[in-house]
Each structure stands twice: as C-alpha cells, then as structure tokens.
Image (cartoon, rainbow, N blue to C red):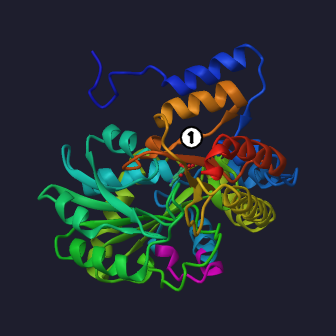
Amino acid sequence: MFSGRIPRELESNRLSLAVARLRTEGRPILDLTESNPTRAGFSYPPDLLTPLAHARGLAYRPEPLGVPDARSAVADDFARRGRHVSPGRIALTASTSEAYSLLFKVLCDPGDEVLVPQPSYPLFEHLTRLDGVASIGYRLEYHGRWSVDMSSVERALSPRTRALLVVNPNNPTGNFISQADLDALAALCGERDIAVISDEVFADYELQDSRGVARGVLLDRTDVLGFTLGGLSKSVGLPQVKLGWIAVSGGDTIVEAMLPRLELTCDTYLSVSTPVQLAAREILDRGAEVRRQIQARVRENLAQCATLVGARPACTLLCTEGGWSAVIQVPTFETEEELMLALLAETSVLAHPGYFFDFQRESFVIVSLLTPADAFAEGLSRIVDRFRAETRL
Ligand SMILES: Cc1ncc(COP(=O)(O)O)c(C=O)c1O
C-alpha cells in the first residue's frame, strides 16, 4: 500500500531504544547530542518573536519567491558575512530541508542521482528518497583537515547525476570547502550541466581558521549553476520559526532559466508564512544576540574538548573549522554501537557514533558543542575516562 520512498523498516535503532528505556525509568542522561538550540539553555530575548504578531500579516498577497523586503533582508544578511547577492536571486523556503526538496524537484526526474558527501548529515538519505531521487556518496578524507576525495567524486558521477551537495562547513566534520576543492568540483560539474548545492546553515559558527587553506565561495562563481542554502534555524537559533532561503548563482543565462522554474515550484506550495516573511528583517537583526551566545558556547566547548581529549593520548580530537559538533577518534575495542550503549549504561552519557554520519571506519564519537558547558565537560570527561588505561600503554 505504501510508497517505496518511505523506508520499509521504521523501527528505532538500539541506541534510541536504550535512551527511551532510561528515560522511562527516570534515569538522568547527560545528553551530548542536543542539536536543538531552543533546548540548550540560551537566553532568548522574550520579545524576539513579537514581530510575527504584527497586523500587517493579516493581509495575504502571495509572492512565490518571497516578499521583496524579506528577500532584501536575506541579501543584507549575506552582506553581513561579506557575500554579495541580488535579492532577485533569492528564494525563501520554510526550512533548509524544504529548500533541498524544491531543488530536487526543479533539477531531477525520478530515478536521477544526487551526490552527497560522506561523512555528513544523515537526513540526505531521506530528503533524496522522498523526492524519488537516489543519493550517491562521495568521500571526504582526513589528513589533519578534511578534504574532498576527488577520485570518489569521479567514480560517483553518472549520466543521471543532476546535482552535487557540499555542506559548508560540514556537519559533523566541520570543514569548510577549500578553494581548490570547489574549483575542481565546479569544473567536473559545470562541464556536465550538474548543479552544485552548498548548504551553509552553519557558516556563522567559525571555530578556527582553515590552517592557511583558502576557502571556496560558490555564490561568486559563474562557471556552474549554484545554490547556497541557509536559514534561521542555525543562523539565529530559531528552527521553529521555519524560514530558510536559497541564493541562486551562476552565469546569467542559466540563472534566468532557473528562476522561473523555481518560482513555479514555490508557487505550487506557497509554504512560507506571510507573518514570518514580514518579520524576517527584524528577526535577522535581533537574532544576532542569540547567535553571539551560540558562538561563544561552541567555542568554549571546543576549547574544553581540546583540553580533555588532549590529556588522553589514546583519543584524538579531529580538526574542525566550524559548526556545532566535535569529532573524537577513540580506540576500537568494540563496535561503535557497543561503545555508545556501554557509555549510556555505565556512565549515563549519550553521544553519537560515527556510523550515524557514514564515517568510513570506526571508531568515532560525535558530540554536540551546543551542550551547556558544565554538562559538556562532565559528559566528555566520562567518555575519555573510559580510555584512561590506554594512556599508560
Ligand atoms: C547540514 C544541515 N542542513 C540543514 C539542516 C536543517 O535545517 P532546517 O532546520 O533549516 O531545515 C541541518 C540541521 O541540523 C543540518 O545539519
């Protein structure tokens, strides 16, 4: 009866079952996986969402790509980060996830393929599948910093490839795309009429520089059709407000062909609420206060992480340049799943295993830098203490 786009197996994995069991028993958990900023102890200005209630939102005048002032506000927000884009090349969406769905509809036919980085954000599997397209992995590799394994991209390309995704900085590995990698990807994609989608939801959360490696900027390129994605969920910590955006880049001819197709797709759903569009400028401006708190938290936790992991020679904190996660490589005495279950049962700490994000091998522990600082330090100490004995080897 049901579409093959919905996975056949809907059961929870062993880790979520174990978490549910502990919660039912009322056992406290030190959760180092929290990625919802509204549950991470930040102090949001109580009137931050007041602009949503303004009477101007009582009139409905649909604008498929978004109301002009909201598109200008998003262009101004790009300018805040030193990026320049015309408001006419911006489309508003209800979220970044919806932005992906709209782009897959415009770019792909059923059965077409989209290349996705591995390791990366696990939702791509569902996002592609729900739009009837296949996600094909290409590899990122780590040599002191993460970069794209170009030969894996070449192997993944096929006549059905329509788009290649980069997450910039990537979740959870935290690498920004380098100029050299983006040049190479744009060359491969541009000549095959494959679009590049750059998910920049974490772009505001720079953790450290890229060790002298120049960063690539998709928005400035004319050699490939590009889409730069962002949204309120990370930039001002408001995932529940539901506003994302797409900035379209590339040569004028292809962008002019793209925009009416995107507009038609947006017009079919008109999913972005009028009040949020009318409030976008104010929320973007005033949300800076929340962003500053998140920036301070993730930097403080990363510094703490470097100290705690640095004291355990058996464990290594991988280099991260941005985002909300840290990746710690640990010795493999058991599978990642066994390790996570043992950490939960024996120390009440919940962390994510690398395989959730398609790391190529084990063992990696992923922790959220959004976690309140005291819980983060305590939880991480318990994780690395598990490998204390190895420090004496
Ligand atoms: C890389 C990446 N893109 C997109 C999203 C989702 O953003 P939104 O809430 O705007 O759909 C997330 C959420 O964690 C993410 O990690």
Start and end of the magenta stretch? 78-88
When asked about the image quadrant of residue 308, the answer is bottom right
Helix, strand or loop at label 1? It is: strand
The number of callouts visible is 1
Question: Could you say which quadrant of the image residue 142 lies in?
Answer: bottom left
Residue 324 vertical placement versus 350 (above, below): below
Q: Position of residue 27 (x, y in %)?
A: 77, 20
Q: Is residue 144 left or right of residue 195?
A: right
Q: Badge 1 local density, few (<14 within 10 Å), some, or many (20+)?
A: many
* Residue at x-position 58% and y-position 28%: 341
Residue positioned most to the left:
159
Is 330 situated left or right of 217 in this image?
right
Q: What residue sits 67% from the left and 56% below the top?
A: 309
* Residue at the spot of label 1: 352
- Residue at image location 59% in from the left, 51% down from the top: 393
Kind of residue at disc 1: His
